[in-house]
Image (cartoon, rainbow, N blue to C red):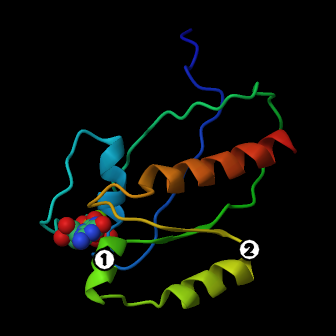
């Protein structure tokens, strides 16, 4: 039997309205380049990526509590004064729920990997700590 090349497999789900920029956030993990064209996702897109952490993995029972993060998209547009949700409102919501908050731009590649890495790290830490 072939041994898997990973210790853990986590599933991340991006949820929001159409055209907010979910698919573009995933492009750095695929061979696709950022596109200005809006190509609506019909059904669900699946992408896999491998992230390495430094600590030694200890297998424990997986937690069933989901980990949430609030990801602001398209922050490259905010210089032009275009912003649907004020930054303070987003920050307040994230603080209230004690979840990670990050502002990203898929177009300019700002903080996209940070967003995914942070969520993955949080799940990984919870697994490590039981
Ligand atoms: N300016 C800018 N446009 C973006 C960004 N991310 C996505 N878009 C544009 O927003 C539209 C919808 O993006 P998409 O990822 O398909 O949205 P989805 O429906 O949430 O998957 C496309 O025209 C993208 O080019 C971004 O970071 N900056
Ligand atoms: Mg999409």
Badge 1 marks a residue whose secondary structure is loop
Residue 103: percent from left, percent from top: 47, 69
- Provide residue 30's location: percent of width, then percent of height: 30, 41
Q: Quadrant of residue 80?
A: bottom left
Q: Residue at position x 79%, y 49% from top?
A: 126
Q: Give the residue pinned by disc 2.
A: 98
Q: Is residue 57 left or right of residue 29?
A: right
Does residue 117 show up? yes
Q: Nearer the viewer, residue 123 or 1?
A: 123
Residue under the point 58% across and 30% down: 52
Rendered image: mark on residue 51: none
Pick the residue in front: 1 or 110. 110
4 versus 22 height, above or below: above
Q: Which residue is mark 1?
A: 18
- Position in image of residue 64 (x %, y %): 75, 55
Question: Can you tell which of label 2 and label 1 is closer to the viewer?
Answer: 2
| Cα–Cα span, label 2 and label 1 | 26 Å
């Amino acid at each position: 039997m072939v041994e898997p090349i990973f210790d853990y497999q986590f599933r991340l789900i991006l949820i929001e309205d159409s055209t907010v920029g979910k698919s573009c956030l995933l492009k750095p993990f695929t061979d696709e380049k950022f596109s200005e064209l809006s190509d609506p996702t019909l059904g669900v897109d699946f992408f896999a990526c491998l992230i390495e952490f430094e600590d030694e993995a200890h297998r424990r029972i997986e937690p069933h509590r989901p980990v949430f993060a609030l990801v602001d998209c398209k922050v490259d547009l905010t210089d032009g004064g275009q912003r649907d949700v004020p930054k303070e409102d987003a920050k307040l919501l994230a603080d209230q729920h004690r979840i990670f908050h990050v502002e990203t731009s898929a177009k300019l590649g700002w903080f996209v990997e940070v967003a995914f890495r942070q969520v993955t790290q949080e799940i990984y830490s919870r697994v490590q700590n039981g």
